[in-house]
Amino acid sequence: MKKIQLNPLGVLLCFAGLTVISLLLFGQLGVLIASLLDSGFSLSDVLTDPIDVELLKNHKSSLYIFQVISTLGGFLVPGLVISYFVEGYSLKKFAHLAKAKPILLILSGTIIFYGALISIGLMHEINQLFPISDFWKSKELQNIAQQKALIEGQGISQLFTSLFVVALLPALLEEFAFRGVTLQLLDRTFRNKHAAIITQGILFGFMHFNMSQMLPIMGMGILFGYITYATKSIWYSVLIHFLNNAIAVIALFYADSYQWAKKMNADESLPYWQYALGVLILGIGLYYFFKHISKNKLDESQPIANHLNNMDYE
């Protein structure tokens, strides 16, 4: 099959349109399938009083189905369509799917993650200095209620289900869509890596519709963008993203059973020296992360195959 030839801006506009259409179509498909399996499920009825956690819990399985289908369709399908039909966008290069290096995964999952986790708290503190309208406050309460309904439960099987639906799936698909496809398209359109990375981070923040967490989400999106751009691989940001989600899921799941989980879920401020320490730890982790990348790029003694993942995909 002969593929379509489009300039980068045209591909970006097609991807944006496909994403909107996919979110709507797969959202409706998720509602339809959930309704067929649960005759009492109606998304409009649930959204009538979305802060009623017990009402949401009564339809937890249906909410799982709806979230999985809408997330898979909305964030995965547009990128697959572009890679299949448009010339010059093979999936591996287009979505930044280069293989991850073990040493960088270790750095990502330990020092960078720990520093980023504390830095998120600092950005949250700064975010609270900005006024938030009643409309966005009500949206946040809705999001909290829906997350509680999806996560709260008993037994290890429910915990793993929540980890998959709320932590792993969003981490994989959001990184694919934003640090993979969107970052690549913006980079080709702007021809400026900083503009591309910052723009996708801003879009990532607004996509969550959470004004009280807007700055932390944007900050993490930009951090993930720089890591992905330098490595041509989304797997480092997938790992950090998943660990961040997983901590939140576990804390909420055990909030009624253990004091440590209740404390983690209390959203209490840390002393400023701890925030400063977190930023320092994050800086150290990123320094060694990018230093390792630079070392590999400059090491001419290694076979050329070892350098392919560090090259720009053009």
Image (tube, rainbow, N blue to C red):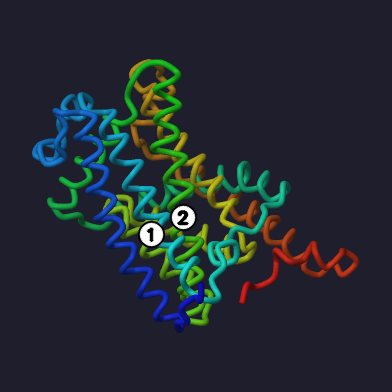
Q: Residue at x 20, y 24 (%)?
A: 58
Residue picked out by circle 1: 204
Q: Position of residue 13 (x, y in %)?
A: 35, 75
Q: Nearer the viewer, mark 1 or mark 2?
A: 1
Left or right position of 134 against 118: left
Front residue of 27 and 218: 27
Q: Residue at x 48, y 64 (%)?
A: 181
Quadrant into which the C terminus falls? bottom right
Front residue of 294 and 181: 181
Front residue of 35 and 233: 35
User: Which of disc 2 and disc 1 is earlier in sequence?
Assistant: 1
Picture quadrant of residue 56: top left
Q: Position of residue 266 (x, y in %)?
A: 34, 31
Decide: is 114 above or below 309.
above
Give amino acid for label 2: Met
Picture quadrant of residue 153: top left
Q: Residue at x 61, y 43 (%)?
A: 109
Q: Residue furthest front?
A: 1
Residue picked out by circle 2: 220
Q: Residue at x 61, y 55 (%)?
A: 283
Decide: is 259 above or below 125.
above
Q: Secondary structure at mark 1?
A: helix
Left or right position of 101 against 66: right
Give amino acid for label 1: Phe
1 and 2 marks in contact (CB < 8 Å): yes
Q: Residues within 10 Å of mark 1 (few under 14, many from 20)?
A: many
Q: Position of residue 102 (x, y in %)?
A: 72, 47
Left or right position of 289 against 66: right
Front residue of 254 and 156: 156
